[in-house]
Amino acid sequence: MEDQSLSRYTAALAPKNIPMLDKLEKDARDRKIPIMQPDGMALVQHYIKLIKPKRILEIGTAIGYSAIKMALASESAQIFTIERQEEMYKEALKNIQSFGLDRRIQVIKGDAAETAEEIRQYAPFDFIFIDAAKGQYRLFFELYSPLLSQNGLIITDNVLFRGLAAHPERAESKRLRKLAEKINRYNEWLSSHPDFDSVFLTVGDGIAVSAKK
């Protein structure tokens, strides 16, 4: 099988959405708003069910899809999610409210590169999900990893970047090549981090799972 066929196969095996989530997912894909791939999201939900985090931090809200999915994986977790774009922020608030999750999901308007001190008041977090500006992954990890609880996990999405992280030279444009190179450098840095053990999984668009040593 080709890689894409394998991805479609595993995505088809992921837990099915409720109709409201199917609609939200279809809307995002129709509008080309990036959301996590089904098999990757299923893995995130699985980790949440395993470690039962009390507090989750998400860096990159977009329309609130992944925050909603994480909240549905846990009946008690409080989720704090950061979004810098005004339009996405407003849409996320609307979507979260429509699912009746506005008491458990707090959307913070701001640039994650600048909100670490504001977020500190909600720490420690048992689970941190990085899925924002890919060129700033290392910065986000450095800013927010000190807020992780001792037995917590940090998950980074899109670490394969459509396979380009391993082969930046295959990128169709200079911009994509530079971004792929940045992600590759992040992966190499993370793999040799002195304080974290990380595994890199070929699920979805690539997921890194990091735990404190």
Image: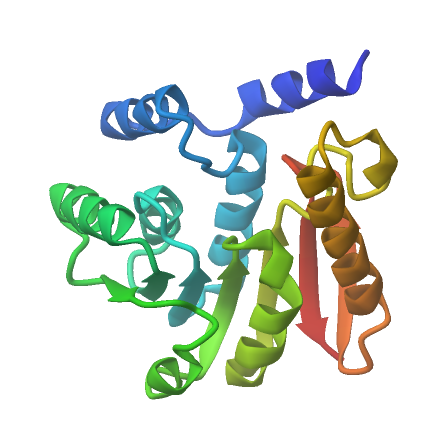
Tell me: residue 107, above or below residue 64: below
Residue 203 found in image quarter: top right
Where residue 92 appears, as percent x and y from the top left, is 24, 48
Residue at 16 percent of width and 57 percent of height: 102
The image's colouring method is: rainbow
If the image is split into quadrants, where does the C terminus sit? Answer: bottom right
* Numbered circles on residues, count: 0
Q: Residue at x 83, y 30 (%)?
A: 170
Residue shown at the point (79%, 50%) measured from the top left: 181
Q: Name the foreground residue: 168 vs 211.
A: 168
Horizontally, residue 27 falls left or right of residue 157, namely left
Residue 185 at what x, y percent from top left? 80, 59
Q: In the image, what residue occupies the spot 78% across and 58% down?
A: 187
Q: Quadrant of the N terminus?
A: top right
x and y percentages locating residue 24 in the rendered image: 29, 29
Q: Decide which of 54, 22 is in the foreground and name it.
A: 22
Q: Position of residue 25 (x, y in %)?
A: 36, 28
Q: Residue furthest front?
A: 174
Residue 5 in view here: yes
Q: Is residue 77 visible?
A: no
**Based on the displayed image, in which of its 4 quarters is residue 7 positioned?**
top right
Above or below residue 209? Residue 100 is above
Within the image, what quadrant is residue 165 found in?
top right
Q: Residue 158, relative to residue 28: is it above or below?
A: below
Q: Is residue 208 above or below residue 164?
A: below
